[in-house]
Image (cartoon, rainbow, N blue to C red):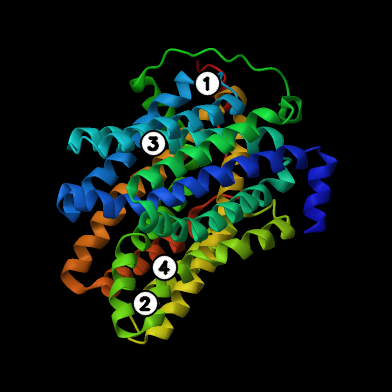
Amino acid sequence: MRDFYLKLEKESVWGKLAMVLAVVFFLYLGDAIISDWIPTYMQGVLGGSLAMGLMISFSSVMGLTADLIFPQLFKNVNFRKMIVLAISAVFITAGILLWTTRLMLPAVFLLAMGTWGVYYEFLYFGLSQFVAKVAPVTARSGVWSVISVFKSIAYCFGPLISGWLYLWKGSVIVIFTYALLALMAYLVWTTIEMRSVSTRGEEREELEKFNIIEEIKYWSVLSEHVWPILLTSLTLGVVDAAFWTTGVVLSDRLVKENWIGGLFVSAYMVPSIFIGFMVARLGIFKGKKKLAEIFMLLTGIFTMALGWSHSVYLLIFFALMIGITTSVAWPLLGGVYSDIASRMGREQKHISGIAGSTVNFSYIIGPVVTGFLASKIGETGALMYLGIGVVLVSIFLLMVTPKKLKLPQVEISTWG
């Protein structure tokens, strides 16, 4: 870990990273609180799990739309403004959610979920730009790992805080806490000297016009060259979406057999707290694509193994191993995206957009596919077939992924 910090100090990055970590921790903690509370709240208000699922999936649809619009609309907006926009989206989401406690209409919930989905994209675009611009190439995977550690810590404590707040004072206090944490993030962001987050070179910050058809053309050009990492992030995203939907249902079923079954999703989530620091210490900056695909292959094998055992203890063990392998794969993948963004210069938000779209798309299709399979063959069977698919995709990618992803730099220079 010392070598990682020395790399950051050498590039004058540590102070900038520390501030960003403080901000994203507050944002992620608020998000974890609201994420734990809102499914049950909406299911109770709207009268069913189907309506709740459709509402939550709408946030991913809006996120996918934002991925198309943001790269052009916010092309010249730096990462500092994107973080502020993310915080603003939290305040708006909190206000609309507070409104739902008085006016329980589906349209109001759709508005809240839509704003929530846009918040994720503001935050992702801001963090992607920060890592690409500020972190040296040798530390990018490590920076993403440390960010993932703070996110995981927040998601460990968030559900506990959410449950306690709801039992104490009900839904309103949960929403107010969500907004309060965003306010704390904003205060941290604005009170620390802004020169400590100065970027390499000045950036214009005006809004641009956008054309969705044009953006789709840009994505098409990029996809021809970076499709292996897009397929990798899509596949890992489907696994994550499956765990937070089908996996949660399986956990609820397992806990009826044995109390330890309730740790199924926790076993998947906890490793990223520790693995992130390990990845950062290794300082991996070469061969990130292949390593990510190897760990995705292991993810597929362990996911497939969920269907081979009826032992609760083995299921917990396999969930833990899946958490470990995905915790290594995601930061490596983030490092690859940051490398590409750095090479794209002013056009880097296009790669952030297409990267975000793969995750949003995985959260649209993942719950539907695994939910359908679970209804036919059970949760473990659904996850087993998902694992088979992940293994096949991983083997294919290991065979065809080039050592270096080449970008059409001449064509990119004509964009905008």
Residue with the mark numbered 1: 75
Report whether 52 appears left or right of 389: left
Please tell me whether mark 4 sits on a helix, a strand or a loop: helix
Label 3 Cα neighbours within 10 Å, binned few <14 / some 14-19 / many ≥20? many
For the residues bearing labels 3 and 2, Cβ distance under 8 angstroms: no
Please tell me whether mark 1 sits on a helix, a strand or a loop: loop
Please tell me whether mark 3 sits on a helix, a strand or a loop: helix
Where residue 407 sits in the image (x, y, percent)? Answer: 56, 33
The Cα–Cα distance between marks 4 and 1, rounded to whole angstroms, is 38 Å
Q: Amino acid at mark 1?
A: Lys
Residue with the mark numbered 3: 94
Q: Amino acid at mark 3?
A: Ala
Where residue 369 sits in the image (x, y, percent)? Answer: 25, 58
Q: Quick check: can you spot residue 292?
A: yes
Between 11 and 409, the residue placed more toward the observer is 11
Q: Amino acid at mark 4?
A: Val
For the residues bearing labels 4 and 1, Cβ distance under 8 angstroms: no
Question: Height in image: 65 above or below 18?
Answer: above
* Residue 348, image quadrant: top right
